[in-house]
């Protein structure tokens, strides 16, 4: 299971966005969540899902606005599931708490933790395939840094192309030439981002499989 805990940055001096954000996430990811996204501890929201693709999509969504510190926790959760996400417990929730606490000190405001003790020491010569939280965090941070440097013009093109629109159609919609759209796409790193989504999703899937299995076997 993946648990995301996101803490609104500077919530005491900014308008509360937890409510509007959780309603939007519930609408956009309906059917892909273990339980609805929930408010926790006033200025936090919590997400619980079994899907790596949904986890990645929500992390990219929240970090784009630079208004959240975001932590992914990966591992088992206490069963049966409660009526609400905020009532959940188990190793994945504890890992998410550790992750969001550490995320607050990161340049990207993002971190990943698993419920496996001393994850960063979990790799060994006998398990070279082990994807630790540090692996997922490091690679995801590269994507977040790329996205953080994207201009408004780059995001304008991204928001059209990510819906499935062809780049030449997006250029026409924006009112720029095809060569200008190509230049904008290169500057925005769109091809790099789109190429990274599949591998990052598979990395998170494997991280969850191993972490959850180790939790259940301890």
Image (tube, rainbow, N blue to C red):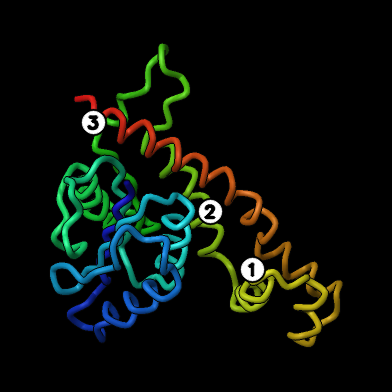
Q: Marks 1 and 2, Cα distance to the nearest angstrom? A: 16 Å
Task: Tell me: residue 61, above or below residue 16.
Answer: above
Q: Residue at x 21, y 30 (%)?
A: 117
Residue 59, located in which quarter of the rendered image?
bottom left
Location of residue 83 in the rendering, given as x and y in whole percent from the top left corner: 17, 63
Asked if disc 3 and disc 2 are in contact, CB closer than 8 Å, the reply is no
Q: Nearer the viewer, mark 1 or mark 2?
A: 1
Q: Nearer the viewer, residue 181 or 205?
A: 205
Q: What's the residue at 74%, 85% (across, down)? A: 174
Mark positioned earlier in the residue sequence (3 or 2): 2
Front-lying residue, 22 or 14: 22
Q: Is residue 20 left or right of residue 145?
A: left
Is the residue marked by circle 3 packed among few (<14), some (14-19), or many (20+) residues within 10 Å?
Answer: few
Front of the two marks 3 and 2: 3
Which element is circle 1 on? loop
Task: State whether residue 197 is above or below residue 150.
Answer: above
Q: Is residue 45 left or right of residue 33?
A: left
Residue at the image position 28 percent from the left and 62 percent from the top: 35
Q: Residue 148 at what x, y percent from top left?
A: 51, 64
**Gap in Å between the C-alphas at discs 3 and 1?**
37 Å
**Mark 3 / mark 1, whichever is N-terminal:** 1
To which residue does mark 1 refer? Answer: 162
Mark whose residue sits in front, 3 or 1: 3
Which mark sits nearer the N-terminus, 1 or 2? 2
Quarter of the picture holding the C terminus: top left
Disc 1 packing (10 Å; few <14; some 14–19; many ≥20): few
Residue 143 numbered mark, or none:
2
Q: Give the residue displayed 60% in from the left and 74% down from the top.
A: 155
| Tag 3 near tag 1, CB within 8 Å | no
Which residue is tagged 3? Answer: 216
């Amino acid at each position: 299971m993946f648990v995301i805990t996101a803490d609104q940055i500077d919530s005491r001096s900014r308008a509360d966005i937890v409510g509007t954000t959780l309603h939007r996430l519930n609408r956009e990811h309906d059917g892909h969540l273990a339980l609805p996204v929930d408010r926790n501890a006033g200025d936090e929201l919590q997400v619980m899902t079994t899907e790596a693709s949904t986890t990645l999509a929500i992390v990219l969504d929240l970090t784009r606005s630079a208004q959240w510190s975001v932590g992914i926790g990966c591992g088992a959760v206490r069963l049966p599931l409660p009526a609400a996400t905020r009532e959940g417990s188990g190793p994945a929730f504890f890992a998410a708490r550790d992750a969001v606490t550490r995320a607050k000190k990161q340049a990207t405001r993002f971190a990943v933790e698993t419920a496996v003790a001393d994850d960063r020491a979990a790799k060994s010569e006998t398990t070279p395939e082990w994807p630790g939280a540090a692996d997922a965090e490091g690679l995801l941070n590269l994507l977040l840094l790329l996205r953080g440097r994207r201009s408004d013009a780059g995001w304008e093109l991204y928001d059209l192309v990510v819906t499935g629109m062809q780049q030449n159609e997006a250029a026409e919609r924006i009112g720029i030439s095809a060569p200008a759209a190509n230049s904008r796409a290169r500057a925005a790193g769109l091809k790099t981002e789109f190429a990274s989504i599949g591998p990052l999703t598979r990395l998170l899937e494997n991280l969850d499989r191993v972490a959850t299995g180790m939790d259940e076997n301890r």
